[in-house]
Amino acid sequence: MSESPGATATLPEPPATTEPPKALTAQRVQPLRRPGRWIATAVVLVLVAQFAHGLVTNPFYQWDRWSYWFLRPTILDGLLITLEVAAYSAVLGLVGGVLLALARLSRSPVLRAVSWTYVWAFRSIPLIVVLIFLYNFSALYKTLSVGIPFGPAFFSFDESKLATDMVVAVVGLSLNEAAYAAEVVRGGILSVDQGQHEAAAALGLPKGYQFRRIVFPQALRSIIPNYVNQLIGLIKGTSLVFYVSLLDLFGSAQTMGSTYPGDIVPLLLVVTVWYLILTSVVSVIQFYVERYYARGATRSLPPTPLQKLRTGLTDLRARIRREAAV
């Protein structure tokens, strides 16, 4: 059948359907079952519960005596000495570590050799050996003098009067801490991108200015968190100053334990709890220091414990609502 030139062809309409479209049903994705994780969690919870039960109910721990000794003036005096030794040693150790790191990175072969030898020696010798050696240093050198090498001395002094128990403890810990701090500082300086050095050199900046204003501020992002972590080991290391006759926290507990032999276990628990408190405070400081220096290095800062708690509670409420809706 032919169509006229001006006529338009019309397509046939599709047949009308009387059935409505099927509704899409939401399907919940079931998580993968992990029975091994649940079994491990149950085993750990049982072990933790048994440990806590034994810790509370075992009369051998004598928690009444622990509460008696925890805030005694003798223990608090020892705690104060521990804090003083740790604070002085941390500052002096960091200063010595910076100097040793700069000497290790120097172009002078003598400075590099001396710095490497120092770090190698004090990282190899146990801290207790260093402390006892310094405590008996006056047997080797009764007097110390300052003057021209191989020439006359300007003045001299008695080493036994200068080296008190506090001085010996601080010097010994500082010498040992400087060796470890040197590696922390050196690693932080080497972590700065080489392009920063090249850009500073291209601007014609002096070497000292480059280090103070460009290299070292960027290295602090790596140095400070690691050195704060090093402080935890320093606080625990102060317990060794008891062997140079300085009654710190551990030394005070040992002295009281020899006087009251029936309270040795409670006194050890007192020392344990105080060291846990000190290291926990340093750990909190470490977290916030790392979080502060993470700015600009990560897209989002790590959440604080309070933020983690809020997020966990929010997720728990949302999960309960989903379960109730199903």
Image (cartoon, helix red, strand yellow):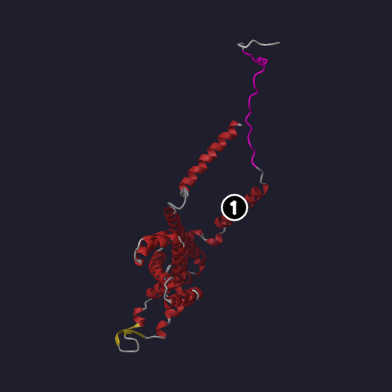
Q: Position of residue 240 (x, y in %)?
A: 47, 72
Looking at the image, which residue sits at the far front? 5
Residue at the (66%, 11%) spot, across then down: 3
Residue 145, image quadrant = bottom left
Magenta span: helix, strand or loop, mainly? loop
In the image: residue 262, left or right of residue 163: right
| Residue 281 vertical placement versus 177 (above, below) | above
Q: Nearer the viewer, residue 10 or 87?
A: 10
Is residue 51 something that shows in the picture? yes
Is residue 192 something that shows in the picture? no
Q: Which residues are magenta?
A: 8-31
Q: Nearer the viewer, residue 221 or 198?
A: 198
Q: Nearer the viewer, residue 25 or 275?
A: 25
Looking at the image, which residue sits at the far bottom? 151
Residue, disc 1: 49
Q: Position of residue 293 (x, y in %)?
A: 42, 55
Q: Quadrant of the N terminus?
A: top right
Which class describes the residues within 10 Å of circle 1: few (<14), some (14-19), or many (20+)? Answer: few
Q: Nearer the viewer, residue 170 or 242?
A: 170
Looking at the image, which residue sits at the far left? 154
Figure disc tally: 1
Q: Amino acid at mark 1?
A: Ala
Residue 231, image quadrant = bottom left
Q: Is residue 17 magenta?
A: yes
Q: Secondary structure at mark 1?
A: helix
Q: Position of residue 73 (x, y in %)?
A: 39, 64
Q: Is residue 154 magenta?
A: no
